[in-house]
Amino acid sequence: MQDHSIEALFDRPPGPLWLMDQAEREAGQLAMMAARFEELRPKLAQMDKLATLQGVGAVSALNDVTPLLFQHTVYKSYPVSLLEKGRFDLLTRWLGGLTVHDLSGVDVSGCDSIDSWFDAIEAQTPLRPSHSTGTTGKLSILPRDRDELRRFEQTRVRGLAEPFGDEPDRLTALRDGGQPVPIVYPSYRSGRQTAQRMLDGFVRNLGSEETTYALYNDFMSADVASLAGRVRGASQKGALEDMKIAPGLLQRFKTSMARQANQAQDQEVFFERILANLAGRNVLAFGAVPFLYNLTVLGEARGLQGLFGPESIITSGGGLKGASVPDDWQERVERFLGAKLRFGYGMSELLSGHGMCPHGHYHVSPYTVPFVLDAGTGVPLPRDGTQTGRYAFFDLLAGSYWGGFVSGDKVTVTWEGCPCGRRGPYVHRTIERFSELEGGDDKISCSGSNDAHEEAMSWLMAQASEIA
Amino acid sequence: MADGAGERNRMTTVDIPLIIRGQIIETDMLRFDARGGGVDFRAPDLTRHLSKLPASPQSLTDLYQLSLDEIIDFMAEVSARLDFDTNVHLRAAFELSSRTSNLTPSILEQVYRNFATGFNREVIARFVDVQIGRDVLEDWVPQDLGGGKVLNLRAFGARGIHVIAGNSPGIAFLTILRTALTRSDTIIKLPSNDPVTTVAIMRTMIDVDANHPVTRHLSAAYWKGGDERVEAALYQPRNIEKIVAWGGFASISHITRYLQPGIDLITLDPKHSGSIIGAEALASTQSVDDVARRAARDIGAMNQELCANARVLYVVCDENDPAQMAQLNRLGERIFAELQELPPTLSTVAKQVNAELQEQLAGIALQDDFFKIYRTADELAGAVVVSQIDDVVEFSDILSKRTANLVPVASVADALKRITAASQTIGVYPDSLKLQIRDALAIQGAQHIVSLGKVTQVGAVGPQDGLQVERRMLRWIRDMDVP
């Protein structure tokens, strides 16, 4: 009998992992999802409620799980006023409905900030939560535990260069000699945001603190990231005048805003540091396209090329984020950095990423059960041929929380037949956000409101400008 | 959400003419992006007609050869001709709007029918009296200032561009009526969510009298909002004195680029509305039922497409008292039920879901500690979210398609603090409370105050968003007699 456990799947080497045919792969995935449903339902109040609402009693086919996929909003469904009122007990109870770990005995009486609440949770439970960047001022909080964090780190390390067939084993080449790998990261060094959790994993598994070059050598505070959301909440209650923001927090907010304003300068200083310390060395570097392109422009201005050693791994993703770069950006970036870029597609809700093969396809590993949903109806599209719609998935690496998610991405998936030899589904390179596809078409309505986030930020800036 | 090739295959193309002072232009057509509902539209390339669009100041002289009564007669005649059963232009507009508008056909039909039935001569005459006062429109009105000084005051029309909203066809009619009664020259910038109603009314005016001065001072054009080639040329003090701009942040911000001395911008900002409901509402089953019926009307009328519709409803209620919270939840449940009972001319299930709103509702639907949701499996039917603590849902900005949020507040004073200049209409229960808090509401920023359940009966008479729009459209001139 086949061992349908995530441990067995996780331990498969890349060859056999990528050669499973659809029937074998999906049989294992179904068995795991069915077991996960049985096991988690009694422990996850929120998933149980969804199953009840949708009338799903068991998972006996892959598509049975699609009514049970969580929207990204589930992990941010707490009222932001809990933070303002310091009701960390209620926040704990809320999070408790999303994890199998029992949080009822957690003592949060000493908490006075979100960071301190995370500290308390981590000190008293196996949870190692990840939070989002909080672009809208409200953090989503994923209640991951130690085991998931470990798998997350391992899968992300493997994902750097999964050699398949005769593809070169670039990770082994990079680690050649066993010295800590220099890591270049253009953001905060630490924090609980998914990207910082990932960086921690690379530093722990491949590098060292001494050989890590982060743009900002400090901690990304969840309190700073959620400040605008708190202000917005207070403003909505007409209670802005009574709002008390700890001076230290306001100071950190001010620093973070100053960094955004000085990004270009900070990047130049960072560039000098990298140039002085890492020129010619094999490194592991990360960066969204606009950042890598900015570095390239700085380098080209000095007539530099081949900055890093040829065995370097340079990982990029996340799209252009609204920046405009010339058509030949990739060629120029690679010439300047001295190594090929490796692309990945992933999201903070997903523990493993989808790495790109030499044929430009993002491959979905068997740890993830992908679904393509009809953009209008949400009905799952056939699991064959090529399908375009909303991307959704069940993350089998998630064991302590519900791994089913619906994304906001419009993708095209081909279910079989990549010339690279990997079996199974892959996501095409062009990925769009549904939110960016809608709207913006000159419709005028008398109903609407101002940008509340913008107003909260400007209020905060005014407060911050009054402190020394 | 409309998407995919199937939609495109069923696409029909509609031509939106350019109307310049009674002349209909349908040449140099440009195609504009699909608008949903399988309708694509084309409109003349405005850059080829820009020089014809502005009027000269002296061209307004012809409007002063008419008495106000003659203008009222003409508008009453136009209104009568906007008979839904016989007017082919209005029928065509209705057919198209049925596909492009967020409003459903039964509601739209009612709005279109109201053009003929709601604006007879008497109504229009009263509108002039209340909004402006007919004496200053007709002649110089002397006022003795003492010491032999006399102020002779008269209000004159101006040349303006109205960037109107398209969420209700009534806005097109109101704009034309305002233009006629103030003896103004108006260019209406058609909104893409209703490019047809204005045109239907203007075509009817041309049928009634193509050479009537009122007809000859109305123009309608579509261009893509923000098109610099058009806007930089039009928004010049030599062309216009007034801009009346409805709606969104984006549309106002690109207009502000062209502001300069000599142009008066009248903004009708996007607004949201709500309700303040006293503790009396939860006193008995009967009061809950009564308040639910009223609240459902304020929320659901016109499918919550208007700025006046209630979205967040504050109810005085102790969030720590289970009995009171049970009543509040019952009120939420009853409101949802009453929403389903509204007459189809006023409210129906939505045409399509708002995907972002559904995502947000899905997020909070899985827990009962902070929010309870009353709805059915039919996402088109709307929903009532009852906050279990004093907290408005994060996504209150996008509450739509008959979706409202009931929020318990400790006191009326607590509710009043949340009213701002962005709060247009506040429905109040009970009536005695309205009298007590109307000054405070006004000081906080609210603009229209009405009894709960009567929001949709407020009508167009009276100020809008704290402004007397017709008076702002006019130029107030004094001729001083000084001894």
Image (spheres, coloured by chain):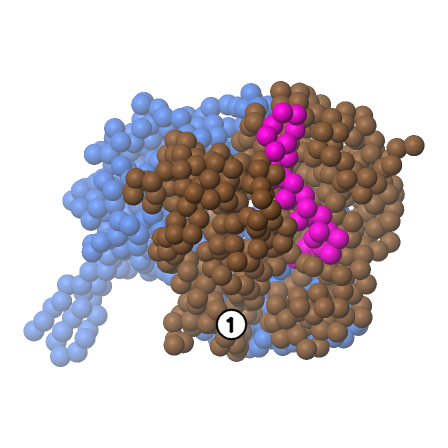
Chain colours: A brown, B blue
Image point (84%, 41%), residue name: A5
Q: Residue furthest front?
A: A177
Please give the range of residues in magenta.
A141-169
Left or right? Give the position of A27 relative to B87: right
Quarter of the figure with the C terminus of chain A: bottom left
Name the one closer to the observer, A88 or A365.
A365
Please indicate, yes or no, whether residue A107 appears anywhere in the rendered image. yes
Q: Chain of mark 1?
A: A
Residue A379, position in %: x, y?
Answer: 71, 33
Asked where in the image residue A308 lies, by quadrant, the reply is top left
Please indicate, yes or no, whether residue A194 appears anywhere in the rendered image. no
Residue B405, position in %: x, y?
Answer: 64, 59
Judge whether B87 appears above or below B135 on screen: above
Judge whether B172 appears above or below A130 on screen: above
A144 inside magenta stretch: yes
Q: How many marks do you count on the picture?
A: 1
Residue B184, position in %: x, y?
Answer: 27, 47
Q: Which residue in the structure is indicated by mark 1?
A: A249
Quarter of the figure with the N terminus of chain A: top right
Image point (28%, 60%), residue name: B135
